[in-house]
């Protein structure tokens, strides 16, 4: 098929790469907010496994043409699919972008709305297609940052909002190469699919925030929250997924999805106290490691040096959107704490965000560089490189012998046996 992809989101880049990889003729025009030159240099795109190489392969084989945002779309032959993957902030641009491309579309083209927009937006976009035979479907963006190529090419499911059988058939044909092992399409009405995407994010965030609340209670009662997590997860009605307490979640897709859900509820007149609490708990949890540091040193933090391992909002990505580290840095700097921060992928994004701060030193090589001369270590992002440090060397480096584990990846008793004070989320141990 002949496909036009519009947008500068991860979903747009992945769709352009994957669809051209399986033989479709794809033209990708990024959004004006970030052209191809900016995307090609971005850490988040280059850190995604296989994505950049697949984009280059598509171009080399003549199956993918990447345009500048202002370039006209070649229209020697009409396009059968328009794939729209915009950020929520670009929603107001969506209708105009669609209308501008309609002269290039076939009479029976399908618009695939892969953007996280409010409920009902796919229908509004369909009205801009200019021909009653053209239809719009909602395809929920279920990509996982850090493994976007894998989740697109080997999907566990496609959540398709579609009110037209012909459009469903066309989408199935477009994605047939990724639907081989079993049928992964789950079709429902468009509005239901749009709301399902938002509701999924809301439920996952609620589970995380609830587990974080239980971890706080466990701290107060002197209970190791890991026993509680295991007990809850063993109940088949609950399960283990998203029950790991931590120092807060972030990420562009997850966070923006929650805000869209809040917007939808507010617009419907059904304000959600539950969602407000979920968001408040998460922001509160981003300060957890700072509060533990404060308690350990009885509020005397000025002049201390703290090492932080991990800036990205999750392992496998270079993004720091809404990441807990941003809240931590503000709190530490307000107390005059010098921070030595290591991350294997997100240092450039952090520098772009906070600039050159006099109380910040950054490292992306050996994680041990960051712990030299530090009074304490905060584990914020659970990169695999951090899971098994040289404990004796680490204990000798940390003047205060304090390890603050924001992801509960270490065994408290083992860490304590190495002579370190361990403080996790709902877990603790002393030498």
Image: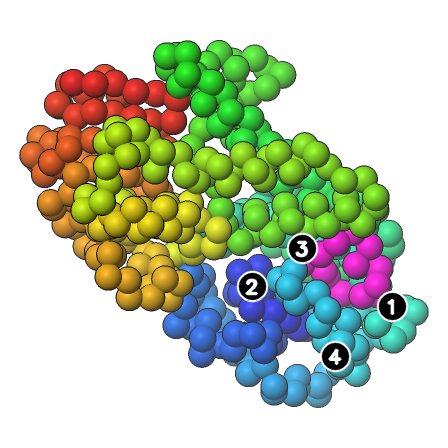
| Direction from residue 127 to residue 414 in the image, left or right | left
Q: Distance between the residues labelled 3 and 1?
A: 18 Å
Quadrant location, the C terminus: top left
Q: How far apart are marks 4 and 3 (CA)?
A: 20 Å
Label of residue 9 in the image: 2
Dot 3 or dot 1, earlier in sequence: 3
Q: Position of residue 302 (x, y in %)?
A: 22, 45
Task: Say which of marks 4 and 1 sits in front.
Answer: 1
Q: Position of residue 106 (x, y in %)?
A: 80, 76
Dot 4 or dot 3, earlier in sequence: 4
| Direction from residue 379 to residue 112 in the image, left or right | right
Instruction: Give the SS element for disc 4.
Output: helix
Q: Position of residue 122 (x, y in %)?
A: 79, 59
Q: Quadrant of residue 426?
A: top left
Mark 4 Cα-neighbour bin, 10 Å: few <14, some 14–19, many ≥20: some
Give the magenta part as a residue range. 111-126
Q: How far apart are marks 1 and 2 (CA)?
A: 24 Å
Q: Is residue 15 visible?
A: no
| Direction from residue 149 to residue 197 in the image, left or right | right
| Direction from residue 94 to residue 124 in the image, left or right | right
Q: Depth check: 421 or 165 in front?
A: 421
**Pointer 3 residue:** 116
Marks 2/3 in contact by CB < 8 Å: the verdict is: no
Q: How far apart are marks 4 and 1 (CA)?
A: 13 Å
Q: Where is residue 102 in the image (x, y as percent from the top left)?
A: 79, 78
Q: In which quarter of the image is residue 400?
A: top left
Compared with residue 406, is residue 165 higher up or lower down, i.e. above or below?
Answer: below
Label of residue 127 in the image: 1
């Amino acid at each position: 098929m002949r496909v036009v992809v519009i947008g500068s989101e991860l979903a747009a880049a992945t769709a352009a790469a994957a669809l051209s990889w399986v033989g479709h003729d794809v033209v990708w025009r990024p959004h004006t907010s970030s052209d191809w030159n900016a995307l090609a240099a971005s850490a988040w795109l280059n850190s995604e496994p296989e994505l950049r190489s697949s984009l280059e392969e598509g171009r080399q084989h003549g199956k993918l043409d990447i345009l500048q945002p202002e370039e006209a779309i070649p229209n020697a032959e009409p396009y059968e699919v328009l794939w729209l993957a915009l950020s929520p902030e670009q929603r107001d641009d969506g209708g105009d972008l669609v209308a501008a491309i309609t002269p290039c579309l076939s009479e029976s083209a399908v618009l695939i709305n892969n953007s996280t927009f409010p409920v009902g937006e796919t229908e509004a976009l369909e009205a801009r297609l200019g021909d009653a035979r053209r239809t719009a479907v909602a395809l929920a963006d279920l990509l996982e940052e850090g493994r976007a190529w894998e989740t697109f090419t080997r999907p566990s499911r496609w959540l398709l909002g579609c009110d037209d059988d012909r459009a469903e058939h066309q989408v199935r044909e477009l994605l047939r190469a990724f639907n081989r092992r079993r049928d992964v399409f789950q079709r429902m009405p468009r509005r239901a699919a749009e709301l399902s995407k938002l509701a999924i994010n809301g439920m996952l965030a609620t589970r995380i925030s609830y587990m974080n609340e239980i971890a706080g209670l466990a701290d107060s009662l002197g209970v190791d929250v890991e026993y509680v997590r295991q007990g809850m997860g063993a109940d088949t009605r609950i399960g283990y997924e998203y029950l790991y307490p931590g120092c807060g979640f972030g990420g562009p897709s997850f966070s923006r999805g929650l805000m869209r859900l809040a917007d939808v509820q507010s617009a419907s007149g059904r304000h959600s106290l539950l969602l407000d609490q979920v968001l408040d708990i998460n922001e509160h949890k981003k300060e957890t490691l700072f509060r533990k540091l404060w308690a350990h040193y009885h509020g005397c933090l000025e002049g201390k040096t703290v090492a932080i391992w991990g800036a990205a909002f999750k392992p496998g990505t270079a993004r720091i959107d809404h990441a807990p580290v941003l809240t931590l840095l503000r709190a530490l700097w307000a107390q005059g704490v010098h921070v030595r921060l290591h991350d294997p992928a997100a240092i450039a994004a952090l520098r772009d965000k906070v600039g050159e701060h006099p109380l910040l030193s950054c490292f992306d090589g050996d994680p041990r560089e960051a712990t030299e001369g530090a009074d304490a270590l905060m584990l914020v992002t659970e990169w695999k490189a951090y899971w098994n440090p040289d404990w004796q060397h680490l204990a000798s480096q940390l003047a205060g012998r304090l390890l603050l584990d924001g992801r509960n990846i270490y065994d408290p008793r083992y860490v304590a046996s190495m002579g370190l004070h361990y403080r996790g989320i709902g877990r603790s141990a002393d030498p």
